[in-house]
Image: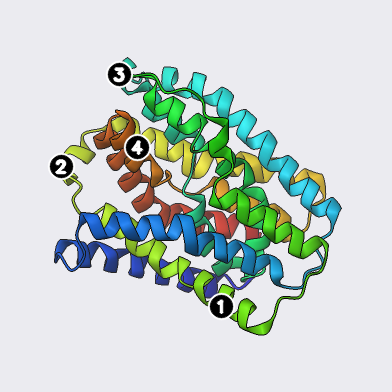
């Protein structure tokens, strides 16, 4: 693992992020365009990226898939229980409890997780990340919405149908291609690769755009978000690193759970808060602070993985 090269690649991602912030401030893209690009990434390019990664030849076997999925399921179960503990420790206001629960459980696994994992371990690592993120895709638009709407008078029911979203469908299609060694026509595979390749730059531009209108003065006054960001970006992934290193996994099988768990708050927090009556200001501030601090925390995690 070439640490300097990896840091350079991560810096490239953040340069594109700041470009997204710049073009939004210059009104080259507006809020409507940003939302449409976000929808494009979530529903089209990211699923294509998942399928693209699973079309590549890999030594990954059924045992590996089971192991990495098991680690992910255990992690999300642990995070679920932490949603009852962490808000009490940092004394979250009752009216903001649902948003903080969402921010504890769901990280930016798609917009930043895939690009960062790819930068560190190469494009083939997207396969591992896609399997690891399967519980995220199943829960973010079900349990996640339930969390955010929990402080709203208009209660939202847990909708199991939303578990079958583009991310989950892409993993299912990709696993079919992988398990049955399906060889797609060149024109199809190249199309899938090209569309999937749009995910990284578009994702970082969307994140930068979403951070453009944050009130910096208000952010600096919210000490809870700093403590929370430290727990999410450093404490949780370091604990996962210490645990998975005892399981005898390969470097990439160790690295993917650590890097994914160390991603900042999911950008979905802002969009879903606006739609389901959560505190979208707190969500925006959380995304901003955790994303900015991840400039420091991600290289730290990479360093810990390299020693």
What residue sits right under mark 1 in the picture? 191
Q: Nearer the viewer, mark 3 or mark 1?
A: 1
- Residue at x-position 43% and y-position 17%: 88
Which of the labelled discs sits on residue 217, or is there none? 2
Q: Quadrant of the C terminus?
A: bottom right
- Residue at x-position 51% and y-position 61%: 46
What residue sits right under mark 4 in the picture? 226
46 w.r.t. 123: above or below: above
Compare marks 3 and 4 and give the one earlier in the sequence: 3
173 w.r.t. 237: above or below: below
Compare marks 4 and 2 and give the one earlier in the sequence: 2
Quarter of the rendering containing residue 303: bottom right
Answer yes or no: do the residues labelled 2 and 1 have beta carbons within 8 Å? no
Circle 3 SS class: helix
Q: Position of residue 268 (x, y in %)?
A: 40, 44
Does residue 255 appear in the picture of this structure? Answer: no
């Amino acid at each position: 693992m070439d640490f300097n090269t990896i840091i350079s690649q991560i810096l490239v991602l953040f340069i594109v992020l700041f470009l997204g912030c710049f073009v939004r401030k210059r009104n080259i893209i507006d809020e409507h365009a940003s939302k449409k690009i976000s929808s494009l990434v979530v529903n089209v390019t990211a699923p294509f990226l998942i399928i693209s990664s699973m079309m590549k030849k890999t030594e990954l076997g059924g045992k590996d898939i089971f192991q990495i999925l098991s680690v992910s399921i255990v992690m999300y179960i642990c995070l679920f229980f932490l949603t009852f503990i962490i808000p009490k420790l940092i004394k979250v206001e009752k009216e903001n409890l649902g948003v903080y629960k969402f921010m504890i459980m769901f990280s930016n696994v798609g917009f930043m997780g895939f690009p960062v994992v790819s930068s560190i371990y190469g494009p083939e690592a997207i396969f591992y990340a896609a399997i690891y993120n399967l519980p995220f895709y199943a829960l973010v638009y079900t349990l996640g919405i339930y969390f955010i709407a929990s402080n709203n008078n208009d209660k939202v029911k847990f909708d199991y149908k939303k578990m079958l979203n583009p991310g989950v469908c892409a993993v299912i299609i990709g696993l079919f291609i992988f398990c049955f060694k399906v060889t797609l026509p060149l024109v199809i595979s190249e199309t899938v690769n090209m569309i999937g390749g749009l995910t990284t730059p578009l994702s970082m531009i969307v994140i930068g755009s979403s951070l453009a209108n944050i009130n910096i003065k208000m952010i600096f006054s919210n000490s809870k978000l700093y403590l929370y960001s430290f727990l999410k970006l450093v404490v949780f992934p370091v604990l996962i690193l210490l645990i998975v290193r005892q399981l005898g996994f390969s470097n990439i099988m160790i690295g993917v759970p650590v890097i994914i768990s160390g991603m900042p708050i999911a950008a979905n927090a802002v969009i879903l808060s606006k739609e389901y009556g959560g505190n979208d200001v707190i969500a925006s501030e959380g995304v901003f602070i955790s994303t900015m601090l991840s400039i420091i925390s991600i290289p730290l995690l990479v360093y810990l993985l390299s020693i």
